[in-house]
Image (spheres, rainbow, N blue to C red):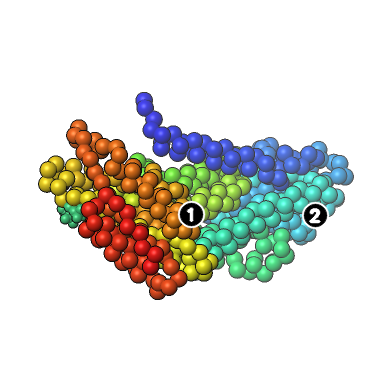
Amino acid sequence: MVVSRKAFVIWLELLLVVGLFFSVIRLMPDSFFEREVENYCEPKAEQINALQTVKEENKSQFKTSGNNQFDQYLLTFEHCSSKDYELIVIELLYFKAIKFMTPGKPGDEKSEIDLKVVNYPSSRFQAYQLDSQLDKIVVEVRTKVSSRISFYLVNQAEFIQSNHNAVVYYAILFSAFITIAIFNSLIYFRSGDSDYAAYLPFLFLNAIFIFLSEGVYRYLNWEWFDQLGAAVTWLIAASSVFFANRFIIRFTQLDLYYPKLTLWALKVPARLCISFGVIALFHINIGLVVIQLMSLWLSIVTFPMLIPLLKKQVFSIEYVFVAWSIILLAIIARVSYGLGVSELSNLVIYGVAVASLFESLLLSLALGDKLVQFKKRETRLYERTLTDELTQLNNLRALKEEGGKVFEMSKTMNSESALAMVDIDHFKQVNDNFGHLAGDKVLQAVSMRLKHALREQDILGRYGGEEYLIIMPQTPLKDAQKIMARILNKINQQEFVIEKQLLNLTVSIGLTAITIDDNNIEESISRADRALYKAKSSGRNQIISVEN
Ligand SMILES: Nc1nc2c(ncn2[C@@H]2O[C@H](COP(=O)(O)OP(=O)(O)OP(=O)(O)O)[C@@H](O)[C@H]2O)c(=O)[nH]1
């Protein structure tokens, strides 16, 4: 199978970014509980229902029922007798409500115990001060989404240390987010580019969503954010998904390639997603299910739609493709954990936040790359407006521009510059005898010879027809005369080979100085033109030079 260079580069980029993504995920501190905290004890745990019949025994991990149902777990600490364990930590990704109760005999009314929450700002762990008198406890948990739950007894000091590691992680993560946001905002304000206008709402909403959903605000002691509640977080999540989708469609012009599919598979679900974000403010359960389903749908469906575009070489699409792959990976990991298909891992815990950062970075790269490509195209177009198509020399517009600059420079520096008009003698005969195409080739061949006879700083251009203009900055007329003599020889001493035929050509040259008495470059040009006319009328193949 032959792999094209472009495909190879895309796969290489994908491999590199995925590799980098997993390296960052592996490096994360305070992640998989067992790895970070060395001294811990897993209590004996049993899942019990309201009637207190044992359902599952002696497991360290359970799956919550979700749907706001109450799950109860009986924990026994007898074998964790060490005094080192001051905290009970419950690891659960989607928290809702937790209660502690005394275990009673079957049929007894359980009484609630008030365990003090340790102000441990994580959305993944909840830590409580343990009463040393207790050796058994019932934990009641209510979650919206079915998810893994584990219990540990730990040493407080060690636990707090792992908390500090998490602070470092969030500080780095959000510094990166803020840098990307400022950088892209600045580019937008300077360029006014509509792609950036579509990208920025997603960038900001996504960062705010991570800030809220990961509980980052707790590290800043902004506890009042808690009062915003899950509903606002989900509205922001829905808006972020909506704007991400809108940006991708605009940037990749998906609707140009698949108008109907884009409308029904992407635009409608995205609108549904943001509408249910608003509904979530009133009915969180309904909102939450639809938002999650729609965001999963959008991430999955966008993916195969992008692949054919990669082949069509749409602008910077590979960065979008790689960004999407990473975010899809993280979403699948989180959802599969939530559904109980996979174990809790760094990928589940950090995947979405780190992937969001990678996504923001890659999309910024995609936007920057598109700008650079537009800039290159613009430069190419601009250069074309200044170039003569046949000879690839400066055209009349470029000559006037460059001539104007030399004229100004000569005036300011009070220095001498020179200007010459070169015209091929009896060029009409070339056309008449050999044809117009041969005439074109002669014009190209003469251009080459003129170019080689001139110095680096001289400006050569086609003034029109078979007439060339040469501007020689900072060159006294005497030196210019020598250069023109060289040109005359270069043309008339060596034959031209045009379509296998030998051709003798001569040129006439009108030369003048660009003087401070001139009002503009046009005056110098018309003086050179008059000198050229004189050279023609005095027999051609010669240089006529006029001072002013
Ligand atoms: N092949 C070709 N011919 C061109 C081009 N531009 C102008 N010409 C021809 O150049 C010729 C210029 O002819 P004239 O102005 O009579 O000048 P000449 O024959 O060179 O005679 P003198 O300048 O008096 O020596 C005309 O026949 C134009 O058609 C071009 O781009 N390609």
Mark 2 or mark 1, which is nearer to you? 1
At mark 1, the secondary structure is: helix
- In the image as oriented, which residue stretches furthest toward the left? 432
x and y, in percent, of residue 108 in the image: 71, 53
The residue under label 1 is 368
Q: Earlier in the sequence, mark 2 or mark 1?
A: 2
x and y, in percent, of residue 235 in the image: 50, 64
- The CB of the residue at mark 1 lies under 8 Å from ligand 1: no
Distance in Å between CA atoms under marks 2 and 1: 51 Å
Q: Quadrant of the N terminus?
A: top left
User: Where on the picture, by quarter, is residue 340?
Assistant: top right
Residue shown at 61% from the left, 60% from the top? 178
The residue under label 2 is 129
Query: The disc labelled 2 sits on which kind of residue?
Result: Gln
Question: Position of 430 compared to 228: left or right?
Answer: left
Camera-nearest residue between 87 and 355: 355
Packing grade of label 1 (10 A; few <14, some 14-19, many >=20) is: some
Residue shown at 58% from the left, 62% from the top? 182
